[in-house]
Amino acid sequence: MNILVCIKQVPDLESTLAVNPDANWILENDTLKFRINHFDEYALEEAILIRESFPDVTIDAVSVGPARADDVLKHAISVGIQDGIHILTEETGYLAPHATASLIAGYAASKSYDLILAGVMAEDDMLYQVGPMTAALLDIPCATSVVKEALSPEAGIVSVECEMEGGMTEQVELTLPALLTIQSGINQPRYPSLSNVLRANSQKRIVISPDTIATGEQRENVLSLALPEKSSKGVMLEGTPAEKAETLLKLFHEKSLLK
Amino acid sequence: MQTDILLIAETIENELTPLSVELVTFARKLFSKEPSRLLMVVPGQKVRQAAERAAENFGIPVLGLENDNLQYPNPPLLAAGLQPVIEETAPSHICLLHSTRGCQTATSLSVKTGAACITAVESIIQETGQPIFKRSLFNGKLVMSLAPATSQTVLTVLPGAFSQVEDEETPADAGEVEVRKMDIPSAGFTPKGMAEMEQSDNALEEADVIVSGGRGIGEEENIALIKDAAAIFSNGAVAGSRTIVDMGWLPYQRQVGETGKTVAPRLYMACGISGAHQHVVGMKNSQQIVAVNTDPQAVIFSVSDYGIVEDLKTFLPILVEKKKEMFDS
């Protein structure tokens, strides 16, 4: 069984973010840190758990991004993925979901993956599109926000539980090959192992130029990025921590909330 | 049946989900300056009743699409069934509720029709004729404005961003209703049923004060700081964001947010929580909100009444100590 995990490198959300001079993405300077999209870590781990449960499973990871995206492929290999495929883009800014999905689908169409996993969303653009769009382009069944999966490879199906709002889940059965977008909390992503880290450092990635894959016309125009309008709602407390604590406690006391 | 805006309602077991009404509010805002023709699609197994109720409540035409496999959400079947409707009605905008299912249907339609696909829309700007859509990035730290580059756009609408306006009048005339059977085979996707995740206690519903922790907690042992802070109140409870529950530091019944509980206590203290929409939607109706976070850019501060830029790991113990000093004799 061949599994592909789609992973994305995203800016560290804890970093201070500023809009670039063209106002079409964030400013990328030396202080901006990057890491793997949190949800993709769960997808990687789920693939590895499947490999531990079934015979003859190989797992590849693919990432669409500029040169620095190699770091997330390195991470994928260091937790146990076999091969890292880097669809190396020139641009460092925003790439529309249709373009990203076209690149991944274009690559995957030439292989025969039984299962494709992706994180449910990307922490940077929060669009939730690349996973299901890749499945639509490949014309394979897709389930989103998966919190539990059970593969039956001989029967050619995967049974999943999809999380819905308000504490409900939907049970769905899909035929293979299928694409699942993975929700956080499904498992506990493991740490890299020494042997895999060494392999990640020495093993070459498979690098693919995006020019070899058709992506079609742009469907949306990003007009601008901006800071959100400052809400007039709140007050930022000033002073030392002790002074701020006092202010709060007086407030709580006035409202008779304290014990 | 030419239409400007197609609204795709969501149903579970042939009942419209409550959020579906927000599609109508959204659509009315989309063309508030020009007359618009709306059509709502109600998918399900047997939808005549739900379709007629919707036509009456919203005063717009409704098309029911029936298929035995639409009893539970079925994005691929819905997308397949919508294609002929889209061809027939040629709408400029096709609107769904934002959820992972809505995005799945939307991306499917975008691939089939070539339409632009804009998800998680929070607001619409319309200075010139063309609407521009705004949505959040990076947990709300930045906002992106987008416009379609195509003549047709599929959108998903963020829950809570287009809540029904209170004084909207009930329409005088019910819209026309048509119900059609969809004769489309399922393609490799079979819903089997739905279930509730374990929810055993009402601690969060009954608390006056909820002290909630997020990623800023750092280590599992720091949950104790949240518990100590909750203990200074006469009716306090501990809760957490999804991140904390994912790591097993708190049980699922303490999760506040879109996929957890929605709470509205007298006071909600968000500690080390960035304020991503998925969490905020679960607590924004709290009577008072206090936020403690090291990141002055954190979006939580824009929904809080009081903001404290501090590390919860140092601030909460000071709060607990001060409380003893000031109020415990």
Image (cartoon, coloured by chain):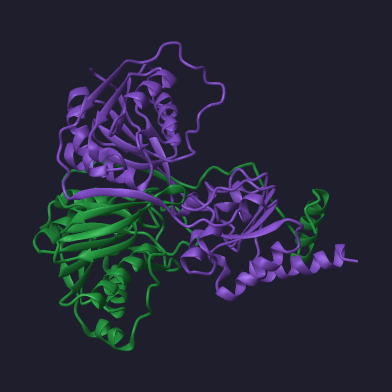
Chain colours: A green, B purple
Q: Which quarter of the picture shows residue B52?
A: top left
Residue visible at 40% across and 22% down in the picture: B53
Say if B308 sits above or below A46 in the image: above
Residue A240 seen in the figure: yes
How far across and how far down the image is residue A218, in percent? 22, 43
How far across and how far down the image is residue B109, in percent? 22, 39
Q: Residue furthest left?
A: A110
Residue B33 seen in the figure: no
Residue visible at 19% across and 68% down in the picture: A3
The number of discs equals: 0
Of residues B91 and B204, which is closer to you in this image? B204
| Image quarter hosting the N terminus of chain B | top left
| Image quarter hosting the C terminus of chain B | bottom right
How far across and how far down the image is residue B136, in percent? 44, 47
* B241 lies left or right of B183: right
How far across and how far down the image is residue B278, in percent? 48, 51
Of residues B143 and A26, which is closer to you in this image? B143
